[in-house]
Amino acid sequence: MASPIPSTATAVITIDVLAAKELLNSGYRYLDVRTVEEFDKSHPDVENVLNIPYLFFTPDGKVKNGDFLDQVQSNCSKEDHLVVGCLGGGRSLAAASVLVNAVVHLFFSFLFLFG
């Protein structure tokens, strides 16, 4: 199987669950960007799982976590490689794009459906 890892961190790529599992088994950290409530209901059973919400759901609608980037930088080192995931893929793609644009790490986004 060809490696899904790009040579540079200039773009976010989407990978499938099997590729994500392979990366997680090779030492990547899993960054779950769902809300704490969603994370508490269900999350992947992997080592190094980290929950930092990208959005909060409020009575007024969705609100972006203004501290997201700072929270990721506080909880991850420059040597960490992350698989970024959520329930449907939209939040993880947006979060990974923010992280790549900040040139924090090499990030991946993938669609991870919880059953």
Image: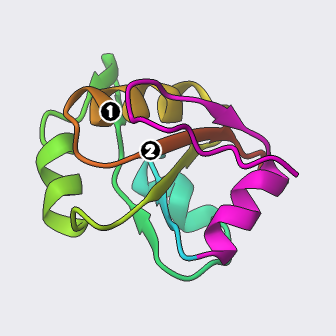
Secondary structure, mark 1, is helix
Residue at (55% x, 37% y) in the render: 6
Residue at (44% x, 44% y) in the render: 107
Specify whether residue 5 is painted magenta: yes
x and y, in percent, of residue 8 in the image:
42, 35
Dot 1, crowdedness within 10 Å: few (<14), some or many (≥20)?
Answer: some
User: In the rendered image, which residue does mark 1 sit on?
Assistant: 100
x and y, in percent, of residue 104 in the image:
22, 45
- Mark 1 or mark 2, which has the lower sequence index? 1
User: In the rendered image, which residue does mark 2 sit on?
Assistant: 107
Q: Which mark is residue 7?
A: none
Q: Residue furthest bottom?
A: 47
Q: Is residue 2 above or below residue 40?
A: above
Decide which of 86, 105 is in the foreground and name it.
105
Q: Name the side, left or right, on which 20 lies relative to 70.
A: right
The amino acid marked with disc number 2 is Phe
- Rendered image quadrant of residue 23: bottom right
The amino acid marked with disc number 1 is Val
Residues at marks 1 and 2 touching, judged by CB atoms closer than 8 Å? yes
